[in-house]
Image (cartoon, rainbow, N blue to C red):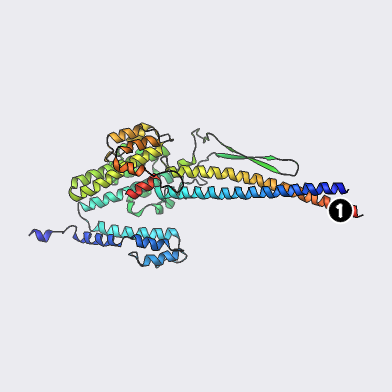
Amino acid sequence: MKGCLFNIDGGYLEGLCRGFKCGILKQADYLNLVQCETLEDLKLHLQGTDYGTFLANEPSPLAVSTIDDKLREKLVIEFQHLRNHAVEPLSTFLDFITYSYMIDNIILLITGTLHQRPISELIPKCHPLGSFEQMEAIHVAATPAELYNAVLVDTPLAPFFVDCISEQDLDEMNIEIIRNTLYKAYLEAFFEFCKEIGGTTADCMCEILAFEADRRAIIITINSFGTELSKDDRAKLYPRCGKLNPDGLAALARAEDYDQVKAVAEYYAEYSKLFEGAGNNPGDKTLEDKFFEHE
Amino acid sequence: MAENLSKVCSILDKLMLETLMLIEKYIDLKINLETTMCDGEAHLAKSRYIMGQNCVSALQLPIKDSAEFPAIATVHSHDDGKFGGKSFDLEFEKNPKNENGESFDPLRWFGILVPQDLHRAQMKYKQAVTWSVECANLQMEIHQNLVKIKQLKDYKLECSTNKEE
């Protein structure tokens, strides 16, 4: 009896996903693409991959932004298809993936409004995976409290916004704090969700999310040197679901320069490796490069 | 007369040599300027890669309806008198403040916690501004030398014509 229920929820989507995974570009594809001299060459080479004739209807001359949009459109269509066929808990998992794009879109819209850009110019720049119905109403908000009450309270991001509500005007410092606080709440919620599901999901995802949390804590610390962000404010932005919690984060909060941050990372084997060889000279890999590679 | 002519010739020689040296310096400065601009652009592209292409783009730049902001660098020009030349002087504002009295840094248009690459791009572009002012100064000097050379050549021609008479 159990046999007929096996894979009933995820079988089709797992098959699709494996197909997509095989279609991801490999080293050989990239070597071919690197040889291209023009964008038309690039289009020709991409036709031989899983991307196929996605640029077939585009008039020449091709622009980089067109290629970017079309590549992203393919990803979005595949993701939407997966999401439409998903049931719990996969549907919540896929929704969690879209929340990070929603946060980026919200910040883009608020910053654009702060610089007096019309909303019609900003909406096309938003990432399609992170779009939500109330996006167009963001420009009416002048303070975080208004932003919450008018726009975000009906979105899935409402529970993440609890720590950000204040009556101060939206300026660059507040926007940065909102961005990082939202992301912290989102990462911690995602971590708890994956842990609750347990099994392979918890094993894979918790490690990935822990690395992401630690990466953000280190990068926030390094980028905050020389800015007006105080150490206490900075400490409030660190996500607490990583390996650095609680001692590493406390040490990072006290750090005052790059060398002190490096010293904190020395206590954790995988992070100390990333600091070796990262430098500021031209031709050196930066710390962000090392983090990308490790990811 | 012959004495005058030989004096004029030697001054002309010196001026020509000086102009050639100035041209060489000018070319070196232009190469420096180009390298610095390329480095700045590379750092800017890196920041775009790190932060995402919509976070470092024309969307963050102010448009004509935005609030006024102060200049970080001012160029002062001084007249040099004799041959109608000018010299230029660059001054960087130590603590630029906007209308509300708050300190102003164009880097804040892109956020508070920006990657180090964006800071480096800003430094490279500031350096490039210094190089371009120096280029302008050199260009003025070369121009003045060319004017002097032309005047001396005319005088020399006049002298040679008078001598023949």
Q: Residue furthest left?
A: A1
Q: Where is residue A36 in the image (x, y as percent from the top left)?
A: 44, 63
Q: Nearer the viewer, residue A9 or A278?
A: A278
Q: In this view, does A120 lie to the left or right of A185?
A: right
* Dot 1: chain letter: B
Q: Position of residue A44 (x, y in %)?
A: 40, 67
Residue A169 visible? The answer is no
Q: In this view, does A206 lie to the left or right of A136?
A: left
Q: Mark 1 points at which residue?
A: B160
For the image, the number of numbered tags is 1
Q: Position of residue A188 (x, y in %)?
A: 26, 42
Q: Image point 24% across, 46% down: which residue? A: A206
Q: Which of B141 and B113 is in front in this view?
A: B141
The correct choice, above or below, for A68 with respect to A135 in the image is below
Q: Image point 47% across, 50% down: which residue? A: B42
Quarter of the image where one finds residue A169: top left
Q: Image point 28% across, 62% down: which residue? A: A22
Where disc 1 sits, the SS reads helix
Residue A262 visible? The answer is yes
Look at the image and tell me in which quarter the N terminus of chain A lies. bottom left
Neighbour tally class for label 1: few under 14, some 14-19, many 20 plus, Cα within 10 Å:
some
Q: Mark 1 is on which residue type?
A: Ser
Q: Which of A112 and B79 is in front in this view?
A: B79
Q: Which of A224 and A274 is in front in this view?
A: A274
